[in-house]
Image (cartoon, grey):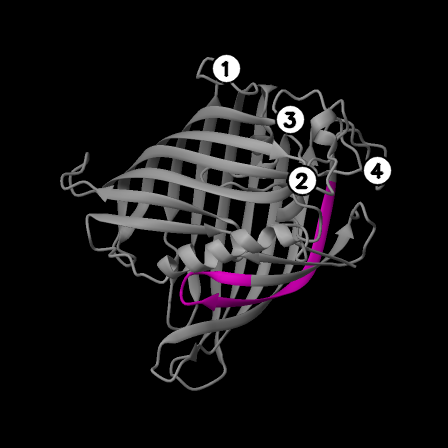
Amino acid sequence: MSFFSVFSGKFSQDKWIIPAAAFFLLIFPALTLNAEEASPFYIDRHIRFWGMDFDFCQVLDTGLIQDKETIIRYSAGSSIRQLGYYRDENDSYSADSNLDYDYTRLNTNWGVSIEQGLLWYTGGEKNLLSLHLKYRGIREWNFNLPGQDSLLFDSVRSDSDGILYNTFIISLLLDNVLLNRESGLKKGFSAELSAEAGPAWFLNDITGNSDFRKYFAGVKSFIPFYEGEDSSGFMKAVYLAGAAGIDYAKGGDIPLPARQTFGIMSPESGAGGMVRGFESRRFDSMTKVINNIELRFVMQQIKNTSGRKLLRPGFLVFHDYCFFDRLDGYESSGGESGSGEISSAGFGIFSEVLFTGNFVMYAGFPITGERIDRDAMSLFLTYGLHF
């Protein structure tokens, strides 16, 4: 059995004490403040372990399309975490358990975007269908901390020490998902169709080299089974959650952050990571097809003596699947080169804290494929439900 976290890899490392204290003393209290969504200016906060992203949003008084909402977003964020580079010095896939794949990455990102509503969702008071145009910049530094000796730094990659790159993004989003904050029930569906381009001429050869294109299509659906209608009862909501998508990248210089992630507008860990129980960022192929299914159970809220909502616990069971292709150096058990599949199942225990989001403990069991350490089960802690 392995035990790790998405933010450090080990809970016992003293080097995380100072940033942890700074996070909870300086940043976490700000998360409990309620944004005024009705205001023409508001802030969206996206917490990450050892990091935070902010969207500073301005709703234009006069939209570009009559009676449709136009939003300008200025984005900035940063985080630090331990990741894995599961390839050898020639950038070919490796699964040798005697080698060290872990390294530490410091990420900063910034951007500006415009969201133009095309259809309005009256029931959710938001854009139902919207077009997004975005510029995104990313600067990352890679480090070998004590106890690490990653293969990344011996590789032929131009971004082994880090990278600076800039991209253009165009995305069409459909979203009618609704969350009942009292019961915790989520229902509805959403879809994303996105393209990202990071050409070499766009100042993408200053630190490391980037010249790539990436495409993504994905859907999410939330189907309600049960919702408690009064304050009594332990179980408040039960619903089925599903997500599926395809991620495709091509180009002469695809940076690690693009190759190792899944999605464009809100990129997540790639095949390893989205299929829980496997090492994060592993199986970083150029093509990924991923499906996640969860059955979620939401419990009664826990309040203090004054009635303030503190926690909302719950648990879930899941099944994850991925087919990947164009993974250099990978040989499947069936003899196929560059393509394969992995899957897992497991359960999770979560709790929403002060309406800032959910802390989740997962237990994942690989079904198809296996971990490098050959463990049959892994436990890991993360922030936020899988999707």
What kind of residue is marked 1?
Ala
How busy is the neighbourhood of tag 4: few (under 14 within 10 Å), some, or many (20 plus)?
few
Which is nearer the N-term, disc 2 or disc 1?
Answer: 2
Magenta stretch, main secondary structure class: strand
Residue in view at x 33 percent, y 36 percent: 131
Q: Secondary structure at mark 1?
A: loop
Earlier in the chain: of badge 4 and badge 3, it is 4
Residues in magenta, as a range: 341-359
For the residues bearing labels 1 and 3, Cβ distance under 8 angstroms: no
Label 4 to label 2: alpha-carbon separation = 21 Å
Q: Residue at x 74, y 43 (%)?
A: 147
- Of the residues shown, which amino acid type is indicated by label 2? Leu
- The amino acid beneath tag 3 is Ser
Q: Which residue is mark 1?
A: 200
Is 343 covered by the magenta stretch? yes
Q: SS for tag 2?
A: loop
Q: Which mark is residue 145?
A: 2
Say whether marks 2 and 1 touch (CB < 8 Å): no
Q: Quadrant of residue 322 in the image?
A: top right
Above-or-below relation of 334 to 125: above
Q: Secondary structure at mark 4?
A: loop
Q: Which marked residue is nearer to the observer: mark 1 or mark 3?
A: 3
Q: Nearer the viewer, residue 387 or 122?
A: 387
Instruction: Assess whether mark 2 and mark 4 are in contact (beta carbons under 8 angstroms).
Output: no
Residue 344 among magenta residues? yes
Which residue is at the front of the view, 143 or 47?
143
* Number of residues whose C-alpha sits closer than 10 Å to that of mark 3, classed few (under 14), some (14–19) or many (20 or more): some
Circle 3 residue: 160
